[in-house]
């Protein structure tokens, strides 16, 4: 927290101002008022009241900050604890599906149910991952290990990894770049999460027959990455809430019941920590374009 | 037949991954706490150690450290297999000499098997 927002610091400043004003009032009173002691006493008692109020407010803020820290810690602990049962479930289903168990042939009908189990375990794990990420971001605890990155190559590689899932969802995933190769300084593991979230969303909400295009362009010392989809779009009324934690639009919930509502919040927080900006344009049923900009390395 | 020491306190995980590895023809030996794990690394000299971090009696990091400090065991490849993913944990494990660091919940059994094969140089 910067010093100018730190409750204790503000409290000390306020105290100093009150003491100075009391002394000033006393000497001003001595000169111009017949009975300065009474005036000084009045100023002093009022100052004391202000002082107490200020102290109470500072304490309140501290308690709030503590509560928020405990909440993040709680999320982190619970999420870690959930991972062991999730691993148990995941590996058991893996084992059942692998055909490695003696004399067990899984019927097609049973297989369907195992797949439901498997998908839902993956869903739980995704939620736990996202929650852990959010709690780490909120504790300000993402270790930043900045490296020189060629954004073009970086995004291209990520887009490449999504090609199989795009194909199976029957979405055409294209990558367009201009000739320049801007370099930026960022933590690769974080930037990866931010970019993945955007591409994953674009594929997920485009549906079969859709198109997703990824652009990289540079302008005015900044590089912009855009992910354009032909998906369900974001209703006008929901647009202002889109980057809020856990927010999901109604059409998103209908189109794709899975999803934690944390991806865009995570992307935005990461890009902001990297010194960039995030935004989007969207029309319902027409598609959305999400973009982020980052400063180019001089 | 490679010998794999699996140090993990969770019974169910010992069973799933243990069964899988045995099915693949590996000789899997188990330890359910850190202290026993460390003793077995020294006495059994396995070809690979799979090590959880949060273990009874001795933390996985201490086991890792001592395995890597002992000249007789330091060359044994060791995969950290945990659900812990705190700040700096991955870096710490790699610095101490772990071959790789896997977050269990994020890997399927087949993916773990592939990592095991790779660490064994197969």
Image: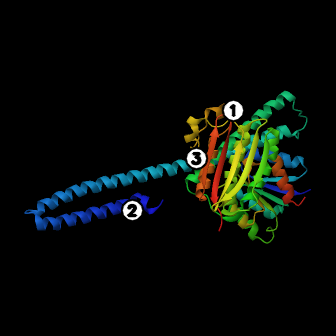
Judge by depth and name the residue closer to the eye, A263 or A167: A167
Q: Residue at x 47, y 52 (%)?
A: A66
The residue under label 2 is A9
Quarter of the figure with residue B70: bottom right
Q: Position of residue A184 (x, y in %)?
A: 67, 63
Going by the image, does A134 lie left or right of B3?
A: left
Q: Which residue is mark 1?
A: A255
Report the Cα–Cα distance between label 2 and label 1: 50 Å
For the point 42% across and 61% down, the residue is A4
From this viewpoint, is residue A175 visible?
yes
Q: Tell me the SS state at disc 1.
A: helix
Instruction: Looking at the image, tell me whether mark 3 or mark 2 is earlier in sequence order.
Output: 2
Ranked by sequence position, the earlier of labels 2 and 1 is: 2
- The tally of labels here is 3
- Asked which secondary structure carries label 2, the reply is helix
**Mark 2 and mark 1, same subunit?**
yes
Q: Tell me the tag on residue A75.
A: 3
Between label 2 and label 1, give the one nearer the viewer: 1
């Amino acid at each position: 927290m910067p010093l100018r927002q730190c409750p204790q610091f503000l409290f000390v400043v306020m105290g100093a101002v009150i003491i100075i004003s009391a002394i000033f009032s006393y000497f001003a009173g001595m000169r111009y008022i017949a009975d300065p002691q009474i005036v000084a006493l009045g100023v002093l008692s009022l100052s004391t009241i202000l002082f107490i109020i200020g102290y109470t407010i500072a304490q309140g803020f501290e308690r709030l900050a503590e509560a928020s820290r405990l909440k993040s810690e709680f999320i982190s602990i619970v999420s870690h604890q959930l991972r062991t049962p999730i691993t148990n479930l995941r590996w058991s289903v893996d084992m059942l599906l692998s055909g490695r168990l003696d004399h067990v042939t899984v019927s097609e009908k049973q297989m369907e149910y195992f797949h439901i189990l498997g998908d839902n375990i993956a869903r739980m794990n995704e939620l736990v991952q996202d929650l852990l990420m959010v709690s780490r971001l909120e504790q300000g605890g993402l270790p930043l290990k900045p490296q020189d990155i060629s954004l073009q190559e970086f995004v291209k590689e990520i887009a490449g990894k999504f090609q199989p899932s795009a194909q199976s969802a029957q979405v055409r995933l294209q990558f367009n770049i201009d000739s320049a190769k801007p370099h930026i300084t960022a933590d690769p593991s974080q930037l990866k999460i931010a970019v993945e979230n955007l591409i994953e969303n674009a594929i997920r909400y485009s549906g079969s027959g859709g198109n997703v295009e990824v652009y990289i362009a540079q302008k005015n010392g900044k590089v912009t990455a855009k992910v354009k989809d032909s998906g369900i779009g974001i209703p006008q009324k929901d647009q202002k809430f889109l980057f809020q934690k856990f927010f999901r639009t109604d059409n998103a919930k209908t189109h794709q019941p899975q999803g934690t509502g944390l991806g865009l919040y995570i992307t935005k927080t990461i890009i902001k920590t990297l010194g960039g900006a995030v935004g989007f344009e969207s029309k319902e049923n027409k598609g959305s374009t999400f973009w982020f900009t980052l400063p180019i390395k001089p | 037949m490679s010998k794999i020491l699996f140090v993990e306190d969770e019974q169910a995980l010992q069973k799933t991954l243990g069964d899988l590895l045995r099915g693949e023809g590996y000789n899997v030996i188990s330890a359910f706490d850190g202290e026993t794990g460390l003793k077995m690394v020294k006495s059994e000299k396995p070809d690979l150690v799979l090590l959880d971090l949060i273990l009874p009696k001795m933390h996985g990091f201490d086991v890792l450290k001592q395995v890597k400090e002992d000249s007789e065991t330091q060359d044994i490849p060791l995969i950290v297999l945990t659900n812990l993913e705190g700040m700096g944990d991955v870096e710490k494990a790699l610095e101490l000499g772990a071959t790789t660091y896997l977050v269990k919940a994020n890997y399927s059994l087949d993916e773990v098997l592939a990592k095991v094969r790779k660490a064994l140089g197969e």
